[in-house]
Image (cartoon, grey):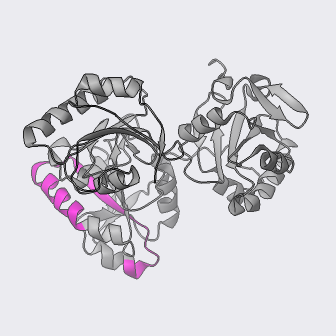
Amino acid sequence: MSAMYDFSKIFGAELQSKSGTVETNSVLSGKYVMVYFSAHWCPPCRGFTPSLIKFYDALKEKRDDFELVFVSSDRDEGAFDEYYGEMTCHALPYAQRDLKTSLSKKFKVSGIPTLVVMGPDGSTITTDARSDVSSDPEGAKFPWKPPTFEEVFPATVVNKGEKVESSTLDDKYLMLYFSAHWCPPCKMFTPELVKVYNKLKETRSDLELVFVSSDREETAFKEYYGEMPWMALDFADRDAKDALSKIFDVSGIPSLVVLGPKAGGSRPVITASARGSASLDNVADFPWHPKPYAELSQTAECNGSDINDSPAIIVLCEAEDDDEQASIKSAVQSVALSQPAGSDVLFFYGTSDSGVVPRVRQLCNLDSSRGETVMLKLDIPDNGGYYVAEGVKDVTAEAIEKFMKDSGERKQLG
């Protein structure tokens, strides 16, 4: 039997209850924990909270192996008190703002209301439990453990009208392309992906790609699929499409997922954010195992995460010559690769004024033209904070490590 998870590590030693403070582990240990990110000022939150509390109270009458913890994004303690007064669950004490921030980072909360479910072992079961409360108001399927890929992927896919047994793909790398005809970024990216796919197929036979359509009707699906050289999920398999989107947390399209060949009955997820790698036309690095560093002028993703979701060390060096840029890239890569396992810090270098590089300069109030080389830390999850290294003449691994230890004054994105 595995040891009980110490929930005080993320919630602190005490939680607030309706009758005062209680020891965190005394109420959460050994239970499923729903974490509710919400705020009094948020209209969607105000609409969802009554349904959630009704669900919580009703399920509590049936089972006692779960708890609900409210994590407030209210702007002052008075609003928190008023809002929490409508709830029957526990809450993170309002004063614990640092813990609120770390919880938001841990679960990559980008908007509210958000409802997360954790297992008794501290694992994250789902970050989209809000939709589960709506679709399963009786809690019959609680704690809503997502199905596996193998459970939802159809037994057949289509290849230009012909049915193909999915089992024939078991020994191949499998790319899933979530896209739609109505989506302008998808329409721009698809021709790039076609080129990359064709290059890959010229030299290797151990991969396949399946289009997972978000089109709104079958005619659009067929027209769009006509531009593609690969396989597709049958448009009629809408439940499978929805389940796959949830499994891989597809919150926007286009999105490209890469899975490894089936081993031991399941496919390993290599990366759920392969769009950036495919955009680079980097066929030599397929299957694009995540790296902790990337070229910011070409992608805002690395190590399976996005610059909007994780803190990032960035060196912008658009005006430097090739030799100096190569030296800077080497320094950034060296530090990135030296980070301990589990680090959520991303590393980027920007060597040209394309992609999101001009936008980063603008947001950080830097020269928007090809200006001075600058090293900065961008922490969008921390309410849009950023830090600029002062007096750095040479961007070396040592200089980057020193900046990471002492980033200086926090500034606010403009």
Q: Residue at x 66, y 54 (%)?
A: 113
Residue 108 x/y as whole percent: 53, 44
Q: Is residue 288 visible?
A: no
- How many discs appear? 0
| 273 is higher (above) or lower (below) than 69 | below
In this orientation, which residue lies closer to the viewer: 130 or 321? 321
Q: Is residue 45 left or right of residue 184?
A: right
| 42 is higher (above) or lower (below) than 129 | below
Q: Looking at the rendering, in which quadrant would you find the N terminus?
A: top right
Q: Which region is colored magenta? A: 191-220
Q: Is residue 57 left or right of residue 400?
A: right
Q: Residue at x 9, y 42 (%)?
A: 322
Residue 215 x/y as whole percent: 43, 73
Magenta highlight on residue 122: no
| Residue sticking out furthest to the front | 391
Q: Residue at x 31, y 75 (%)?
A: 224
Q: Is residue 109 left or right of residue 414?
A: right
Residue 360 x/y as whole percent: 35, 51
Q: Is residue 6 visible?
A: yes
Q: Residue at x 19, y 36 (%)?
A: 329
